[in-house]
Image (cartoon, rainbow, N blue to C red):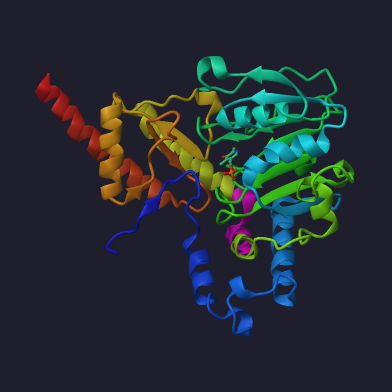
Amino acid sequence: MTHPIYNFSAGPAVMPQAVLKEAHAHFLNYQQSGMSVMELSHRSALFEQILADAEASLRRLMAIPDNYKVLFVQGGASLQFSMVPLNLAHTNRVAYIDSGSWSQKAIAEAKKHVEVTVLASSADVNYSELPQVNIVEDTYDYVHITTNNTIEGTAFLELPRMNDKTILVADMSSNILSSTYNVTDFGLIYAGAQKNIGPAGVTIVIVRDDLIQTQPLLPTMLSYDTYATANSMYNTPPTFAIYMAKLVLEWLEAEGGVALMEERNRAKAERLYRFIDESDFYTSPVAPTSRSLTNIPFLTASPTLDKQFTQEAAAAGLVNLEGHRSVGGMRASLYNAMPLAGVDALIDFMSVFAKKNQLMEVSRG
Ligand SMILES: *Cc1c(COP(=O)(O)O)cnc(C)c1O
């Protein structure tokens, strides 16, 4: 390759090169076992160590207290849309903050099982800003929030104030480990790995242990208790995905942890946003006070030009810049593994593309 590809996909997303190289080096023969990690028994000492290391690393990175369990689940963040109400809605009264398409999906799933109150929504402004959440007076079984709205590009970098009894549940799929959050502010956090942790196939659930109850009537695989009791090994876990997650988590620690990642992510996002805001060619659909550090949507003057942009960008090695199919435009996802050099390459390309197409507008006019 003459120049690197920069992958701006929202997920599955770019992984650290160092991690891919390490996995490659050990792919055929993991720790003198003569086998690939993919071939190891999940009951083997070697795999048990991988699982323990992954959990220990995540606990250090997020300062997860001992009274929280870390569970490795399959079914994606989307299965958590069902598991959360099925496991936590004891009085059938739950509340959701509607900040985007993923919140809407979580709400729709919860409504199949329990009574849902939507505390606040920014649907009326196309989710271009975060909804204003007043202090929650009522006591619900939980209040659900999507910390980062992957499609719309907004994020709750500060949490809305809750009353002391509120159990906050967060879908953190697209900014877990990108920004610092206090685990103790939440009853439960979940995140599909494929945005910011590793490959698709494993979902991480961090849950306060007093919220885990035996649920005899729930399908075994939908009960948090099953995963907590069996150390995520009731059945065969996604062993290779967990191995890759372990490597990414250890890479994150070696790089300097979440605080340093947040600093880098802020620098990357600010650089791109400064360029967009100063440009008279590109616009941002996101209110400045609500902006995500990890997913940055932007537009040109027309869908035709947007399409030309993503095609020419891809030809220049800047791939997966299409906005989500539901909103169009462009979106640059700048997760932890996206280097600042990738953002600079994108800005250079945007600058050249703008000059070229502005000139054409002038000569046409
Ligand atoms: C990607 C995403 C999901 C869906 O994740 P799956 O693992 O594909 O089910 C849910 N919530 C958010 C915030 C996401 O970014």
Region rendered in magenta: 246-260
Q: Is residue 47 above or below residue 201?
A: below
- Describe residue 9's horizontal placement relative to residue 57 as left or right: left
The image shows residue 100 at horizontal and vertical percentages of 57, 27
Q: Quadrant of residue 32?
A: bottom right
Asked if 69 appears above or below 240 in the picture, the reply is above
For ligand 1, give the image quadrant: top right
The percent position of residue 19, horizontal first and vertical second, equals: 53, 65
Q: Nearer the viewer, residue 188 or 43?
A: 43
Left or right of 161 on screen, residue 242: left
Residue, far left? 363
Percent position of residue 56, x then y: 74, 61
**Residue at (58%, 76%) from the top-left corner?**
36
Which SS does the magenta portion mostly show? Answer: helix
Residue 205 as seen in the image, left or right of residue 257:
right
Q: Residue at x 55, y 56 (%)?
A: 199
In this view, the residue in front, 259 or 144, is 144
Q: Residue at x 74, y 70 (%)?
A: 48
